Image (cartoon, grey):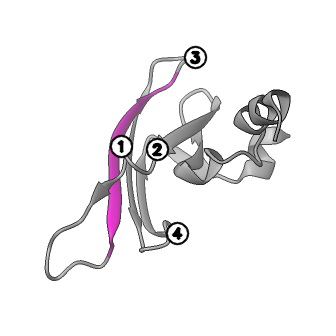
Amino acid sequence: MGLFDKLKSVFTSDGPNQSKLIDIYVEDDKCGNQMKLLFRKSYDIQKVYKDDREAAYEIKKVVVCDNCYNKIDLHLKFDKRYKIIRQEIENGKIISKEEYEN
């Protein structure tokens, strides 16, 4: 692999860093602004240590809309493979990648 191939893999979605990130797409209820959120598995997502847990990992974040400054409360729970098993969101909604891109 040459230098340009390594640089290309860093900046494309097929690169080695992509598996370390989780993309979540959110729409603000107040102004309708759509945002793409990136969470690092090694830093942003917390492991759940409770014995009676339903999830292996979780995210609790307050997202501020960059358009109207509305606060969106986001609480996501993931299984061991980082698939969302429960989602709670206030002042916004989670949308698909297709909705975000259109």
Q: Position of residue 26 (x, y in %)?
A: 58, 42
Ranked by sequence position, the earlier of labels 4 and 1 is 1
Q: How far apart are marks 4 and 1 (CA)?
A: 17 Å
Above or below 91: residue 97: below
Please tell me whether residue 56 belongs to the stretch shown in magenta.
Answer: yes
Is label 4 or label 3 in front?
4
Residue 28 visible at all: no
Ranked by sequence position, the earlier of labels 3 and 1 is 1
Above or below 58: residue 56: below
Residue at 29% of width from left, 79% of height from top? 54
Query: Which of the labelled discs sits on residue 43, or is there none?
Result: 1
Residue highlighted by disc 4: 83
Residue contact at pointers 1 and 2, CB within 8 angstroms: yes
Residue 66 visible at all: yes
Q: Give the magenta-colored segment's residue range.
A: 55-65
Is residue 63 rendered to the left or right of residue 3? Answer: left
Is label 3 or label 1 in front?
1
Q: Position of residue 10 (x, y in %)?
A: 70, 35
Q: Which amino acid does label 4 sit on?
A: Lys
Residue highlighted by disc 3: 67
Residue at 14% of width from left, 73% of height from top? 50
Q: Distance between the residues labelled 2 and 4?
A: 14 Å
Q: Distance between the residues labelled 3 and 1?
A: 26 Å
Residue highlighted by disc 2: 40
Q: How far apart are marks 1 and 2 (CA)?
A: 5 Å
Question: Mark 2 Cα within 10 Å, few/some/many (few <14, many 20+)?
Answer: some
Tell me the SS state at disc 3: loop
